[in-house]
Image (tube, grey):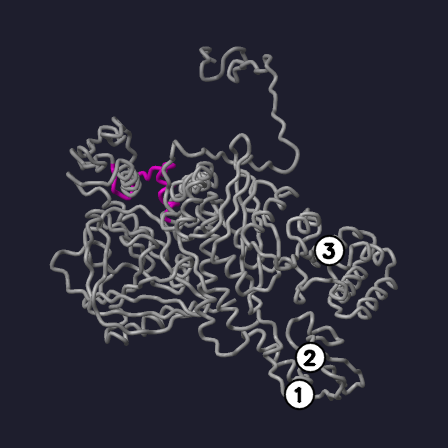
Amino acid sequence: MVKRKLVVICQSRGNFTTSSDGSLIYNGGEAHAITVSSETKFDELKSEMADMWKCDTKAVTMKYFLPNNNKTLITISSNKDIQRMIDFHEDSETVDIYVVKDDNPTTDVTPRPRNRPKKTTVAASVTPQNNSIIDVSVSGETGPLSTVTPQPSNAGNLLLLNNLNLEVANYGDADQQELLKIWKNGITGLHQQFNSVHEFREVLGKYSIAHGFAYSYKKNEGRRVTVHCKGEGCPWRIHAARVATTQLFRIRKINETHTCGAGTESAYRPPASRKIVASIVREKLLETPNSKPREIAEEIRRDLGIELKYCQAWRGMETARKQLQGSCKDSYNQLPWLCQKIVETNPGSMVNLNTREDLSFHQFFVSFRASFVGFLNGCRPLIFLDTMTIKSKFQSELLTATALDGNDGFFPIAFAVVDVVNDAAWQWFLMQLKSVLATSQQITFVADRQMGLRQSIPLIFEHSYHGYCLDHLIEELKQHFVGTYTQEVVPVVIAHMQDAAQAATLDGFRKSIQSIKNISPEACDWIIRAEPEHWANALFEGSRYNHNVCDIANSFYSWVSELPVLPIVHVIDTIRSKIMELMYNCRVESNQWLTRLTPTFENKIQKEIFKAQSLQVLLGLSSSFEVHDSLGAMHVVNVDLWDCSCREWQLNGYPCSHAVAVLQHIGKDLYDYCSKYFTTEAFRLTYAESINPIPTADKHVHKDPTAVQVQPPPLIRLSGPPKKRRIRYKGVVKRPLRCSKCNGMGHNRATCHIFL
């Protein structure tokens, strides 16, 4: 796991100003810098902040904004909060931390009076280093702020300053009664104002739960709402109506008197409605997007004392995700808009959207200009093709084309989302890739031989090569001989097959194949029929640089399968964000390199230099030399042809130990005989261009009636046989009533009129 390092720019003696929309803007102050990583402890960071500004650690409170929301401040109060902040902003470049220094520390979460002690606000701007990129990128619903000075809160509390009301959503270990106390203050009295009727209903629902009373609607319309307490004879009433020409909702009349016992220990706490559950779950999902229904239900029970069934939590999560991200079905209609935005924000990129005859989604291809230009400028002509299933309600598969950069790291070139993976889908994907690369250079593809690419690759990319993925071949071998051999035999056969694939010379390949034949002639025949010229180094004609598996980018794309079910627009933009982060990190990292080769290949060449110390070089004819080792083995090196009889130089792209010995003997520069793709210069050219964000990718897009209405692909069918519907008998099956008192028929004990 790569350790993240952040440079925190701490600003002091500045102040907040409020813009017209209620957002906070920090201005002025002095600046200091410290280093923070994902391993930094909360106590250490807080202590360092206190020492920096000469104050007590108890008086320091650190806060930050949620992504794309500079009205909501999150408090950092634990090690988990530091990691959560990094997770929230993993798709962006910068984040600001605001440190509030209170001259009179207090743990009270209620709004302070106007004569409260003076506060000093300190801001910290975070800049990523060493494979880390931090930015602001998430959406939420908050109202205009009523103050420009953030208030300190209890550990782990999320401050939501809505109009004139302070609402604290507890996400940590704070007592549930503290949150219920805040919910009790949700309704403050006459003329209180809300952003919408939906917000009023939500606050009212929480208010009733906190006070322990049930209510019913006398009127429930978009323009006016009237509710009264269900308690018998209870006079509590409230009436709110919309402010003319706006969406604002204001309390017009209220009777705050309860005679039903609300607010006492004996008060009845009504069950949370589906909308209230969705509201609570929405706040939880902002913190932990990958939570499971049972985990959400347990958190709500622990934090709020509200008992939820699994189905209630699941429905609440579905509703909350729809509110936060939009409908998965409607998201397909946003794809034409996404195509346009990608081209607008990343000029020169290629996007292609295809639908079927019924306008249902079929294929979506994306290749950013920064990706394919980086491949053409600095990557070796080696592409890995792979596929992965996307977690979705609808049929969705991810196709990927990935290269290797000069440091042997994966470099995404293009990806596509398709409704089904078959030969036609791969042929279409390769045609899109061909139009993007537009090069006559010979390219080697590494992919599964069963993916329908055996005919498509040579047809679309002329003079190219197709190397079979060794891992997939091994899985085929296991499946073919399952149950045939003992568990001890198959691993030995696989080990020899791997040796045969890695063998650089034909003699080494034959030796490994003979070992397999001695163990199992049947397995040997299967391996020979598997076309070794496509997977064995000794027989392969293309340049694979000793890479023979296609899952190079598995570590990069594996998080796709771990994501919750997201709308397709969010899936695509999340992939874009990950690629943007990767390119930024690599570009920043390479600026620190001082060697001619990238670190990975600098280490490899140094190992070859060490091995060359024990070799003896004999002069040969012209540019050919003989190299002898201590065991008496001899190899021939041709400097002009970059060739060694061990074939390691040709396979790897950098001099083997025999070639190093010769080059040092004749006084040649080793780095002049390494592939250009391994140089720091080529690496920087690979990541020279940037991928730009799509500013409104996280917001709901209004439907354009003039645009093509893209329908979702078919729903994913459940595995197993279809469930049989139970057909009940329609005849009379009811058992006649029999009285247990008189033993008569047609009535029961309660309706019996016979006195015994």
Q: Position of residue 595 (x, y in %)?
A: 51, 79
User: Is residue 270 highlighted in magenta?
Assistant: yes
- In the image, the segment drawn in magenta is 261-283
Q: Nearer the viewer, residue 415 or 184?
A: 415
Q: Earlier in the sequence, mark 2 or mark 3?
A: 3
What amino acid is at disc 2? Answer: Val
Up the image or down, 731 lies above or below 144; here it is above
Q: Position of residue 496 (x, y in %)?
A: 78, 65
Tell me the crowding category of disc 2: few under 14, some 14 to 19, or many 20 or more residues within 10 angstroms, Cα based.
some
Q: Which residue is mark 1?
A: 666
Up the image or down, 205 lies above or below 597; here it is above
In the image: residue 208, left or right of residue 359: left
| Residue at mark 1 to residue at mark 2: CA–CA distance | 10 Å
Q: Is residue 659 something that shows in the picture?
A: yes
Up the image or down, 739 lies above or below 312; here it is above
User: Is residue 423 highlighted in magenta?
Assistant: no
Q: Position of residue 33 (x, y in %)?
A: 32, 73
| Residue at mark 3 to residue at mark 1: CA–CA distance | 44 Å
Q: Which residue is mark 2?
A: 639
Q: Which residue is mark 3?
A: 473
What amino acid is at disc 1? Answer: Ile
Label 3: state its secondary structure: helix
Up the image or down, 646 lies above or below 402; here it is below
What amino acid is at disc 3? Answer: Leu
Q: Earlier in the sequence, mark 1 or mark 2?
A: 2
